Image: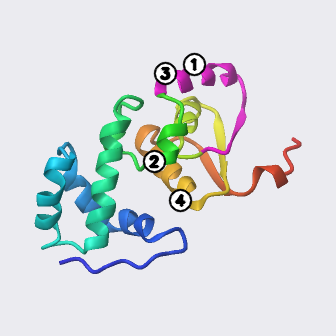
Amino acid sequence: MYPTVGADGTGPSTALLLSVAGQDLLDELSGQDVGPDRTLALAESLRRRYPADLVGAALSMQALRVAARAKFSAAGQMLLTRAGLEQASSELTARHAAVRFASARLVADLCCGIGGNLIALAEGARRVVAVDEDLTSLEFARHNASVCAPGAQVGYVRADVTRMALAG
């Protein structure tokens, strides 16, 4: 049985999902149907081995991953929020937009969210700075970029973009 991981100021589900236990459970759920007719039985079974709050967070994440397949080829490995998924550019759209920045040495993805555009920007040889005020989104963007664009040169800044000096 895994111990419950406490919240770190970004909400308990974020800390739980980023924990070793959370990653283990997400791996176990990978590819599984978590539709309404199966969720209750699956949750009961998983709660024998994992804390209830982790099971709830992981089942919600798996449902988001299933929904994200329409936008992302690596959806099954990504970390998502409902709002982030709804607002994120699809891979196709993000790659199309990233072409405009192909010659730039440094690109800032302001309000990066879960990283839809960030991933496409980071796939090139340029350096990218991801900025978001929401810590959960920024942590998920970091994870998603590491999964979808491993080895990319990305810096992460938690900030309100309306208060940032962007000169230079």
Say whether residue 155 is left or right of residue 54. Answer: right
- For this view, does 18 lie left or right of residue 46? right
**Residue 44 picture location, percent across and down:** 13, 66
What is the secondary structure assignment of the residue under circle 4?
A: helix
Q: Residues within 10 Å of mark 2 (few under 14, many from 20)?
A: some
Whether residue 129 is situated above or below residue 40 in the rendered picture: above
Segment tinted magenta in the rendering: 91-112
Q: Distance between the residues labelled 2 and 3?
A: 20 Å
Residue 151, percent from left and from top: 49, 42
Q: To which quarter of the image does residue 138 belong?
A: bottom right
> Type of residue at label 4?
Thr
Q: Which mark is residue 136?
A: 4
What residue type is disc 1 on? Answer: His
Q: Judge the density around disc 3: few (<14), some (14-19), many (≥20) Cα neighbours within 10 Å.
A: some
- In this view of the protein, which residue sits in the foreground, 6 or 147? 6
Mark closer to the chain start, 4 or 1: 1
Closer to the chain start, of discs 2 and 3, is 2
Q: Distance between the residues labelled 4 and 3?
A: 24 Å
Residue, disc 1:
96
Return the residue at label 3.
92
Q: Nearer the viewer, mark 2 or mark 3?
A: 2
Residue 66: where, in percent of width, then height? Answer: 30, 39
